[in-house]
Image (cartoon, rainbow, N blue to C red):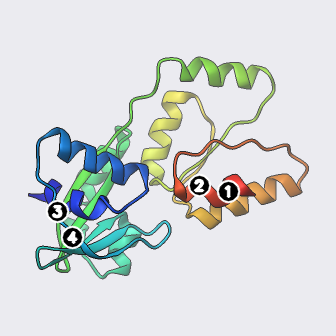
């Protein structure tokens, strides 16, 4: 199954989305096979060999870089993104096998917490590697006006560095290893 091979590759990932895929497979009682030749270039998905198949998982950029055609699923992916889901594509042996939509419900306290920060004069900017449609949908739910989406880890670091250089005091919250460069900036 799609979730089975995706979980096999994502098991080697430190990314929150990858961990969510693994948890989803475990929750369903799916036996996760071993992966070999695992590769996780920063911000560009993951890949590995599972039971004789080359599996590539990631966003549109990861698919493009691996010459995998996703055109027939873009409309489905965009619909899911407009609902606030993050979409990851799963390809096997050079062909798109399917996609997985992952969403994280907004905590009930988050909108009020962000409102209090804005009332205190704090500027809130969302920096995310997610697709623009997903980022905008989540930002709308949270009342965030400034969104920079589709940013790789070094791009997040560059934004933080730029804001600091222009005299802003910057605080950042991150959720994974891909945020480490920006958190350290």
Whole-percent x, y for residue 148 in the image: 60, 52
Q: Secondary structure at mark 4?
A: strand
Q: Select label 1 or label 4 by which is in front.
A: 1
Disc 2 to disc 3, how far (Cα)? 26 Å
Label 3 or label 4, whichever comes before in sequence order: 3
Quick check: 179 above or below 28? below
Disc 3 to disc 4, how far (Cα)? 10 Å
Instruction: Report the residue marked by disc 1.
Output: 182
Instruction: Report the residue marked by disc 2.
Output: 179
Residue at 36% over, 66% down: 60
* Between 116 and 34, the one nearer to me in the picture: 34
Label 3 or label 1, whichever comes before in sequence order: 3
Instruction: Report the residue marked by disc 3.
Output: 5
Instruction: Report the residue marked by disc 4.
Output: 91
Residue at 11% over, 79% down: 52
Whole-percent x, y for residue 33 in the image: 15, 63
| Furthest residue in direction left, as rendered | 1
């Amino acid at each position: 199954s799609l979730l089975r091979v995706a979980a096999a590759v994502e098991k080697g990932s430190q990314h929150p989305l990858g961990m969510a895929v693994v948890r989803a497979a475990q929750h369903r009682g799916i036996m996760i096979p071993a992966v070999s030749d695992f590769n996780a270039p920063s911000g560009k998905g993951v890949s590995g060999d599972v039971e004789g198949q080359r599996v590539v998982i990631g966003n549109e950029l990861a698919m493009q870089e691996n010459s995998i055609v996703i055109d027939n699923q873009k409309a489905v992916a965009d619909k899911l993104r407009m609902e606030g889901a993050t979409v990851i594509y799963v390809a096997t042996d050079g062909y798109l096998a399917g996609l997985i939509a992952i969403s994280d419900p907004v905590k009930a306290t988050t909108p009020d917490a962000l409102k209090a920060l804005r009332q205190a004069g704090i500027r809130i900017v969302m920096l995310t590697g997610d697709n623009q449609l997903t980022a905008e949908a989540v930002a709308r739910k949270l009342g965030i006006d400034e969104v920079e989406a589709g940013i790789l880890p070094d791009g997040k670091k560059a934004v933080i560095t730029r804001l600091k250089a222009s005299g802003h005091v910057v605080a950042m919250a991150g959720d994974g290893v891909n945020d480490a460069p920006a958190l350290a900036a």
